[in-house]
Image (spheres, rainbow, N blue to C red):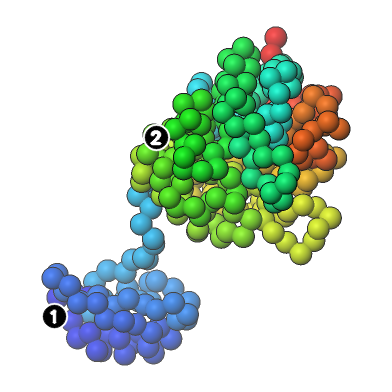
Amino acid sequence: LSQGADAERVAGALAGLGLWTRRLVGAHGVALAIREHSAAVDISRIESLPGVDQVFRAEPRCERLAAQAGRPVEISGAVFGGGDPVLLAGPCSAESKAQVREAAAVVAARGARFLRGGAYKPRTSPYAFRGHGRQALTWLRDAADAEGLGVVTEVLSEGDVQAVAEVADLVQIGSRNMQNYALLAAVGRTGRPALLKRGAGATTDAWLLAGEHILAAGAEAVIFCERGIRSFDSRTRNLLDLGAVALLKHVHRQPVVVDPSHAVGRRDLIQPLSCAAIAAGADGLLLEVHPRPCEAMSDGPQALPPHMWEDLVDALGLGLVKV
Ligand code: PEP
Ligand code: MN
């Protein structure tokens, strides 16, 4: 409020517009905070009330995200937000040295920039295959180096953060851990860039703030990854929220990629969703590709065999084919 303004009067005038307020008294004067669930009123009507000095919208503090907004992010030579979408591809799980090698060669030949693959797998059942751990990290690094790729791989627990950060160019935080704030901070403290998957039931605000946690702890950059949210329909595994992708890209101006594989859960629909993701503004695609999906130890139904991966890249028309 302006110096010497009658706060009661201004609050009364605001109440007349359907706005309910709380008085905040600080060293530099008095402000009125408009409560949630007040009426939606054009800001110029508030500005023109006598006694009102300045009107601003209170947003959660997101200064690290603000600093990253609108800037292309370069990670091991690949640029997110720099024009062409970045392809990050490989198997769901790193199953053996040979499988990882084979997958790396397949994805590199069509222009992928990152090899994906899980060494630590979050599984719904405790009896399912849960990854080969540290030795799988070595398989990923060696195969990626042989093909000139970066590595993106998930870290599940704080105790493995150092080992994963030593190997990964991009440290993946999975959907289930999006709000594991201790893990977010531990990854942030390594300074490595992080790929932050959206929780299946997370709002875009909670997702963005989780990214702020990682950046505030010291990460060089955070790439957001939409991988589908929970819906009522089980025909597709999850619901790919392209509205959220457009929101992050065009409103918040954050680097964002899409994982159509975990979103839709079936290989026949990966191509149309990939095209849609790019149209919505995605800076890249995280795709599950397996040399022989029928042998996959996890997520076989959504894995692209080599010929479908090749068709997909051709359909995207990115001119990424390595010569
Ligand atoms: C993955 O990408 O390997 C994975 C487990 O995905 P999500 O966290 O999205 O389920
Ligand atoms: Mn998977």
The picture places residue 120, in percent across and down from the top left corner, at 61, 37
Along the horizontal axis of the image, is 163 left or right of 276? left
Residue 323 visible in the displayed image: yes
3D distance between C-alphas at marks 2 and 1: 50 Å
Q: Quadrant of the N terminus?
A: bottom left
Which residue lies under the disc numbered 2? 190
Which residue lies under the disc numbered 1? 4
Residue at 27 percent across and 69 percent down: it is 54
The picture places residue 267, in percent across and down from the top left corner, at 82, 39
| Front one among 172 and 244 | 172
> What label sits on residue 224 in the rendered view?
none
Q: Residues within 10 Å of mark 1 (few under 14, many from 20)?
A: few
Going by the numbered disc 2, the residue's amino acid type is Thr
| Front one among 195 and 111 | 195
Residue at 50 percent across and 58 percent down: it is 206
Along the horizontal axis of the image, is 102 left or right of 160? right
The picture places residue 5, in percent across and down from the top left corner, at 18, 81
Q: Up-down: is 205 above or below 309? A: below
The picture places residue 18, in percent across and down from the top left corner, at 43, 86
